[in-house]
Amino acid sequence: MLEVNDIHFAFPGQHFHFNLKVEAGSFTTIIGPSGGGKSTLLHLISGFETPAAGKITFNGEDITQLHPGKRPLSVIFQDNNLFPHLTVEENAALGLSPALKLNAAQKSRVIDALNSVNLEDKAHRKPGELSGGERQRAAIARTLLRDKPLLLLDEAFAALGPALRQDMLSLVKTLHVQRNLTTLMVTHHPADARAVASHVAFVANGKVGISGPTADVLANRSHPELQTYLGETI
């Protein structure tokens, strides 16, 4: 289980106060208005921001002060962070070795990861030769090779068209189940939550306003901020 306990963080003019529990093995989407704190919450969990107070634990281990690279998680951003001078295979292999020094078994794992995201025929291409969806598939392959139990996606598919975004959501959902991951995904699309998520957390005004099973949260009629948000986006 991931637990965000009484986390406080501030930017000039804005204060965030988060509490959230995410069950192990769940797929949770984080929805809410722009500027409400969705990405900030993910950055605190991943270690790219440091809270002023509070604690973040994963499976009982306090990870609040751990360096991002030491946390049991991987992150996929909208900008997939691929290195343009490296091939798809090399970008994926960074998940195993930052120095790209791989033994035969590790090279085989890289090929298997590319196969799992249908990029085996693009292994020797550079990111500039790929479509947006293919670049995100390469980023997912690298994430799989890191083999961490917690997967965070920060609007990873926001730049993709509707059909391609649905393909990527389906792929992530499949890998989530196959790898028994705990997944948190920031999205501007409540339809994404309906399509793939077991749980939803609604974030607005710097806090988690409501969270729970997807159907229950999206059917809630007693939370005015959530209703305003859904009315604007459906």
Image (tube, rainbow, N blue to C red):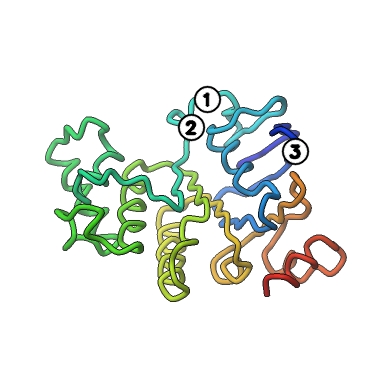
Secondary element under disc 3, as helix, strand or loop, is strand
Secondary element under disc 2, as helix, strand or loop, is loop
Vertical placement of 14 versus 197: above or below? above
Q: Which mark is residue 215?
A: none
Q: CA distance from mark 2 to mark 1?
A: 6 Å
| Residue ID for mark 1 | 66
Q: Earlier in the sequence, mark 1 or mark 3?
A: 3
Residue 21 lies in quadrant: top right
Q: Is residue 219 left or right of residue 50?
A: right
Q: Residue at x 17, y 48 (%)?
A: 108
Q: Is residue 72 left or right of residue 132?
A: right
Q: Is residue 201 left or right of residue 126?
A: right
Q: Residue at x 57, y 54 (%)?
A: 186
Q: Nearer the viewer, mark 1 or mark 3?
A: 3
Q: CA distance from mark 3 to mark 2?
A: 27 Å
Residue 228 rendering spot, x and y as whole percentages = 79, 66
Q: Residue at x 69, y 34 (%)?
A: 11
Q: Which mark is residue 71?
A: 2
